[in-house]
Image: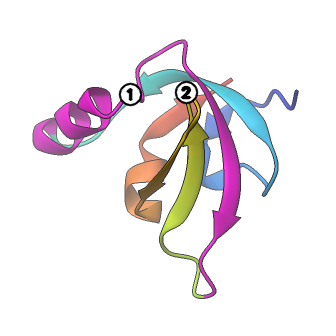
Amino acid sequence: MTRKHGSLAALPVGGTAIVSRVRGERAVVRRLLEIGLVPGTQVTLRRVAPMGDPIELKVRNFALSIRRSEALGIEIE
């Protein structure tokens, strides 16, 4: 398992990390928490779109796509 401090946007394809904190605008943070990106959750970066946005994550056995700008606000360890 790859462990790095930083944002989810910096995780390499195939890398796995644990969400430690979600920051950003209140509405965006709420939506990310509702879809399962809560602190302590393991995420894997599965792929990145050709232009770099969106990114696809594996979270709790399902695929989730989010914008790179949202991934910048998700701190990982």
Expressed as whole percent of the image width and height from the top left, the position of residue 50 reads: 63, 86
- Residue holding disc 1: 36
Residue visible at 57% across and 87% down? 51
Picture residue at 47% right of the left edge, 37% below the top: 74
First to last magenta residue range: 26-50
Most distant residue in the front direction: 61
Eyeballing the image, is 53 above or below 68?
below
Q: Quadrant of the C terminus?
A: top right
Name the image quarter holding residue 12.
bottom right
**Relative side of 64 to 45, left or right:** left
Q: In front here: 47 or 70?
A: 47
Distance of mark 2 from mark 1, alpha carbons? 8 Å
Q: Is 49 within the magenta?
A: yes
- Helix, strand or loop at mark 2: loop
Q: Residue at x 45, y 22 (%)?
A: 21
Image side of residue 65 versus residue 56, left or right? left
Residues at circles 2 and 1 in contact by the CB criterion of under 8 Å: yes
- Quickly name the residue at label 2: 60
Residue 19 sits above or below residue 9 on the image: above
Farthest residue, direction bottom: 51
Dot 1 lies on which element? loop
The vertical placement of 9 against 52, above or below, is above
